[in-house]
Image (spheres, rainbow, N blue to C red):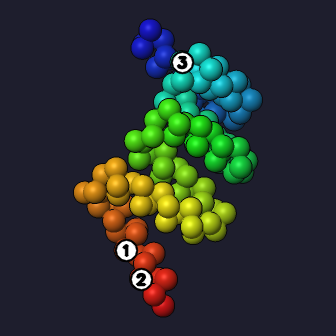
């Protein structure tokens, strides 16, 4: 079963690379509905963000967090979306969550320090 999931995720990725966005979206939605597949969530957020459907991307990311609350990668995707929307509150919120999940996360700590310095100006 895991091999079949990997193949279906790869198929969705291939559709996306071939600019067959609707096919990719359909496959990813199917994987989420059938298996709550983590990789499909990440790809769907990426797809919607790439299509500039930022609200949909955010909704899928938050849905993924209900199933995978410890996911740093999904939180990083939310940060990317929040930056595009110039939502600094959301960026800070997600950075703090990342650091609480993984205190040794150098990238998260560095980003948080940068934002704090910018806000001090």
Q: Secondary structure at mark 3?
A: helix
- Considering only vertical position in the picture, is 118 above or below 84? below
- Considering only vertical position in the picture, is 54 above or below 116? above
Q: CA distance from mark 2 to mark 1?
A: 6 Å
Which residue is denoted by mark 1 in the rendering? 113
Q: Secondary structure at mark 2?
A: helix
Rate crowding at label 3 as few (under 14), some (14 to 19) or many (20 or more) other CA atoms within 10 Å. few
Q: Are marks 2 and 1 in contact (CB under 8 Å)?
A: yes
Q: Position of residue 59 (x, y in %)?
A: 66, 43
From the viewer's side, name the closer residue of 7 and 40: 40
Q: Residue at x 56, y 62 (%)?
A: 90
Q: Position of residue 87 (x, y in %)?
A: 62, 66
Rate crowding at label 1 as few (under 14), some (14 to 19) or many (20 or more) other CA atoms within 10 Å. few
Q: Label for residue 73?
A: none
Which residue is denoted by mark 2 in the rendering? 117
From the viewer's side, name the closer residue of 20 and 64: 64
Rate crowding at label 2 as few (under 14), some (14 to 19) or many (20 or more) other CA atoms within 10 Å. few
Q: Does any portion of residue 85 appear in the rendered image?
A: yes
Looking at the image, tell me whether mark 3 or mark 2 is earlier in sequence order.
3
Q: Are marks 3 and 2 in contact (CB under 8 Å)?
A: no
Q: Residue at x 74, y 29 (%)?
A: 22
Q: How many marks?
A: 3
Q: Work out which residue is located at the far left of the displayed protein and give it.
A: 104
Q: Position of residue 46 (x, y in %)?
A: 59, 43
Q: CA distance from mark 3 to mark 2?
A: 42 Å
Horizontal placement of 102 versus 54: left or right?
A: left
Which residue is denoted by mark 3 in the rendering? 35
Q: Residue at x 30, y 52 (%)?
A: 102
Q: Does any portion of residue 11 appear in the rendered image?
A: no
């Amino acid at each position: 079963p895991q091999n079949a999931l990997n193949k279906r995720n790869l198929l969705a990725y291939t559709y996306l690379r071939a600019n067959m966005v609707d096919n990719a979206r359909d496959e990813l939605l199917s994987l989420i509905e059938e298996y709550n597949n983590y990789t499909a969530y990440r790809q769907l957020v990426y797809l919607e963000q790439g299509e500039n459907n930022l609200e949909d991307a955010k909704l899928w990311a938050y849905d993924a967090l209900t199933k995978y609350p410890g996911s740093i990668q999904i939180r990083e995707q939310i940060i990317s979306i929040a930056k595009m929307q110039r939502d600094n509150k959301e960026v800070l919120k997600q950075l703090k969550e990342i650091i609480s999940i993984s205190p040794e996360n150098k990238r998260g700590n560095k980003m948080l320090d940068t934002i704090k310095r910018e806000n001090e100006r």
